[in-house]
Image: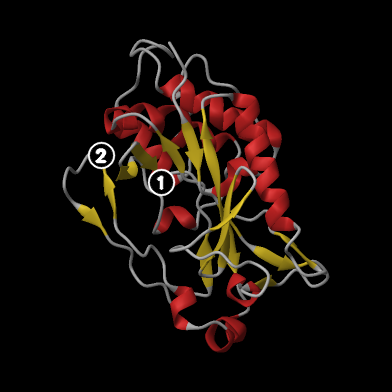
């Protein structure tokens, strides 16, 4: 079966390399010009500020090598904009210093989930995100797919469940990125369950591409698909039951 076109729009936080403190991305508007409404185009994609995080988009592709190259090229372009002393954070959840969060970050930069998303298992029910007063924000690693939403249960099986092999963050799951979370797109759908943990190494980036492709193969691929309620429970709790994984799952760290 031919590969499907994939894209992505991950977010990433910024830290002070010397102190380890998180720095809100809204302070970088002089070096990163892109916004949600008008992303700044770069080779292989685009970059922008999204509240307290930086975000980047990659050009769609059905080729694994192009997927990895697009991610590297756009991440490098974004990293080059960082002022000296700032680095990308590897954490999914950014915990800001409380006073800095309260006094140093404007309310508009603290907003979470500007638009609602949807749950495949609750048709037509929009999910809005509760305002968060804690000085924490979470980074997504959304994957865009040129197929219909009927594949979402398989994406939960391969990507949502499989990502628990390396994504140990529990905070994001409380309010954001539940199983089968998606938004419709003109070309297919945006899978909003994953965090940005999969962008943190080339091995994980390749894993995300391969597992997404396998999720869109013929229905019998991967063995007998377990009850979606069991898969959803694992994703919601962050507790992996390896017996539920597809037979052709690739194990990465």
Residue at the disc numbered 1: 192
The colour scheme used here is secondary structure
x, y percent for residue 57: 54, 48
Looking at the rendered image, the quarter that the C terminus falls into is top right
x, y percent for residue 159: 47, 32
Which residue corresponds to the image point at 64% horizontal and 56% vertical from the top-left? Answer: 91
Q: Nearer the viewer, residue 194 or 232?
A: 194
Residue at the disc numbered 2: 120
Q: Nearer the viewer, residue 123 or 241?
A: 123
Say if 238 sits above or below 126 in the image.
above
x, y percent for residue 73: 69, 43
Which residue corresponds to the image point at 51% horizontal and 42% vertical from the top-left? Answer: 8
Q: Are marks 2 and 1 in contact (CB under 8 Å)?
A: no
Dot 1 surroundings within 10 Å: few (below 14), some, or many (20 or more)?
Answer: many
- Residue 211 visible, this orientation: yes
Q: Give the Cα distance between marks 2 and 1.
A: 11 Å
| Number of numbered tags placed on the structure image | 2
- Residue 253 visible, this orientation: no
Horizontal side of residue 238 vs 80, given as left or right: left
Horizontal side of residue 56 vs 80, given as left or right: left
x, y percent for residue 186: 30, 41
The label on residue 75 is none
Q: Secondary structure at mark 2?
A: loop
- Which residue occupies the extreme left position in the image? 124
Looking at the rendered image, the quarter that the N terminus falls into is top left
Say if 218 sits above or below 38 in the image.
above
Q: Secondary structure at mark 1?
A: loop
Mark 2 vs 1, N-terminal side: 2
């Amino acid at each position: 079966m031919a590969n499907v076109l994939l894209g992505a729009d991950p977010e990433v936080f910024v830290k002070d390399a010397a102190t380890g403190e998180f720095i809100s991305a809204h302070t970088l508007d002089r070096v990163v010009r892109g916004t949600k409404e008008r992303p700044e185009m770069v080779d292989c994609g685009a970059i922008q500020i999204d509240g307290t995080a930086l975000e980047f988009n990659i050009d769609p592709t059905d080729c694994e090598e192009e997927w990895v190259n697009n991610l590297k090229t756009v991440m490098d372009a974004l990293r080059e904009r960082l002022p000296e002393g700032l680095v990308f954070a590897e954490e999914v959840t950014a915990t800001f210093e409380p006073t800095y969060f309260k006094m140093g970050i404007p309310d508009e930069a603290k907003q979470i989930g500007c638009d609602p998303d949807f749950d495949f298992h609750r048709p037509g029910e929009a999910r809005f995100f509760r305002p968060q007063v804690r000085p924490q924000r979470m980074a997504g690693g959304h994957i865009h797919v040129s197929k219909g939403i009927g594949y979402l249960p398989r994406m939960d099986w391969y990507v949502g469940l499989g990502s628990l092999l390396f994504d140990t963050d529990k905070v994001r799951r409380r309010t954001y990125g539940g199983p089968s979370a998606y938004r419709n797109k003109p070309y297919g759908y945006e899978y909003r369950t994953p965090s940005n943990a999969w962008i943190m190494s080339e091995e994980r980036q390749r894993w995300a591409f391969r597992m997404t492709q396998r999720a869109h193969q013929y229905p019998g691929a991967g063995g007998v698909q377990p009850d979606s309620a069991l898969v959803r429970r694992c994703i919601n709790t962050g507790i992996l039951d390896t017996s539920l994984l597809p037979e052709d799952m690739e194990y990465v760290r």
